[in-house]
Amino acid sequence: MSQWEIVILFFLIAVLYASVGFGGGSSYLAVLALTGMSFIQFRAISLLCNIVVVSGGTFIYFKNGYFNWKKIIPLALLSVPFSFLGGYVKISQTLFFTLLGITLVIAALSMWISKFSANSSIQENNGSVVKDGFIGGIIGFVSGMVGIGGGVFLAPVLHLTKWDTPKRIAATASFFILVNSIAGLLGQYQNPDFYFEPNIALVLMLTVFIGGLIGSHISTTKLSPITIKRITAILIFYVGLRILYKHLL
């Protein structure tokens, strides 16, 4: 895969994911996993691109008052340290690709399932601090280890459990992705094996920044986010199965 093909794919992923409130980390990993780049390097690049895409969305949600901090803090309280720990853990290439393949398949299924509740009118509930902390910790650890923000896992879970209104769930997922991506990246940085090429990272970060702006604009038009989720879920599912087939068989 040429560098230009990677740049184009990253741009399209940023547009798609930003239009539905996600960072795109799982798909960035899917693209980079099909190149000759080291898995240690592309985990860091995925998180950097995540941070760029969701920073703008998080600011917009905050500005419009969609954050319920009493419910968000329990989710982030354990997810941040566990995401850091997951990023720090040293894993083999085989284990990484196995986790990545399983993660992509689960992420695809989660995105597909979430479409059924995305437009429903959900009434806010008080939730459970213990349950939210447990969910945040598990998702944070797996996300940090693999190299994603965890939004594709968190949002469907919150929708299916009727955690809050759709807009507040989207805002929570955006914040969750941001803080966990930062924590996971810091954890990777502490690992002695950490490295990446800054030139490649900067080009891709600029690419997803532009794509993220366009995606945020698309989200305000008539284009259905459910349609985008379906297409993205199918692509992620296919790549996840391909990675598992290549590294397990």
Image: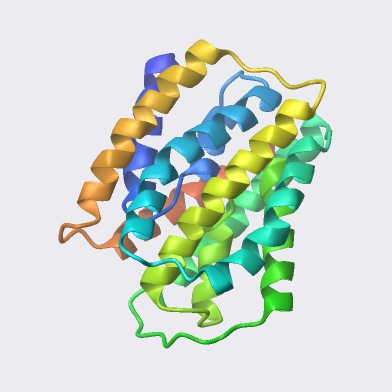
Q: Is residue 218 left or right of residue 225?
A: left
Colour mode of the rendering: rainbow
The answer, for residue 1, to whether it is visible in the render is: no
From the viewer's side, name the closer residue of 211 and 169.
Answer: 169
55 is higher (above) or lower (below) than 93: below
Outermost residue to the left: 222
157 is higher (above) or lower (below) than 5: below
From the viewer's side, name the closer residue of 35 and 90.
Answer: 90
Q: Position of residue 92 (x, y in %)?
A: 83, 32
Q: Quadrant of residue 136?
A: bottom right
If the image is split into quadrants, where does the C terminus sit? top right
Q: Position of residue 49 (x, y in %)?
A: 48, 33
Q: Quadrant of residue 181?
A: top right
51 is higher (above) or lower (below) than 156: above
From the viewer's side, name the closer residue of 56 and 90.
Answer: 56
Disc tally is: 0
Q: Position of residue 185 (x, y in %)?
A: 65, 34
**Residue in the picture at 35% in, 85% down:** 121
Q: Is residue 53 left or right of residue 189?
A: left
Q: Is residue 42 left or right of residue 15?
A: right
Q: Position of residue 210 (x, y in %)?
A: 29, 32
**Residue in the picture at 72% in, 31% down:** 188
Q: Quadrant of residue 171?
A: bottom left
From the viewer's side, name the closer residue of 127 and 12.
Answer: 127
The answer, for residue 189, to whether it is visible in the render is: yes
**Residue in the picture at 33% in, 77% down:** 119
**Residue in the picture at 51% in, 65% down:** 155
